[in-house]
Image (cartoon, rainbow, N blue to C red):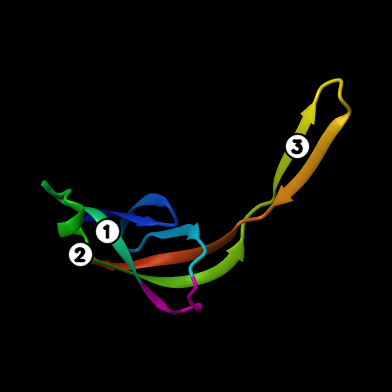
Amino acid sequence: MYAIIKTGGKQYRVAAGDKLNIEKLDAEVGAKVELTAICVIDGDKVEADPAKAAQTKVVATVVEQFRGEKVLVFKFKKRKNYKKLRGHRQSLTRIQIESIG
């Protein structure tokens, strides 16, 4: 059994026991969070209606709060002596899926 969840503007395919990195959640390490399911697949039974799939509870535990790798953004315009270098590190949360159901 697995589900498609939506969090942080992105969608993820998760099953029980999975660990994944998502956009930062305001939760302490060790806290349980409930995520919104938009699709649930159980063998050959598929529940694709978001209203009905939202009744399925996807429970996850926060494992870690951390920052991702640095991403460099370099902008330039040729022959104009215009150069900009900016760096960015996204705040992320690592979660472990406990149960779907």
Q: Residue at x 17, y 48 (%)?
A: 48
For the residues labelled 2 and 3, the Cα–Cα distance comes to 44 Å
Mark 2 nearby-residue class (10 Å; few <14, some 14–19, many ≥20): some
Judged from this view, the residue extending furthest toward the top is 79
- Distance from label 1 to label 3 (Cα)? 37 Å
Mark 3 Cα-neighbour bin, 10 Å: few <14, some 14–19, many ≥20: few
Q: Magenta segment, which residues?
A: 26-33
Taking the view exactly as shown, the residue that stands out farthest to the right is 81
- Disc 2 on helix, strand or loop? loop
Amino acid carrying mark 3 in the image: Phe
The residue where tag 1 is placed is: 37
* Mark carried by residue 74: 3
Is 95 placed above or below 6 here? below
The answer to whether the residue labelled 2 contacts the one labelled 1, judged by CB atoms less than 8 Å apart, is yes
Query: Does the residue at mark 1 contact the one at mark 3 (Cβ under 8 Å)?
Result: no
First reached walking from the N terminus: tag 1 or tag 3: 1
Numbered badge on residue 56: 2
The quadrant of the picture occupied by the C terminus is: bottom left
Query: Which one is in front, 27 or 1?
Result: 27
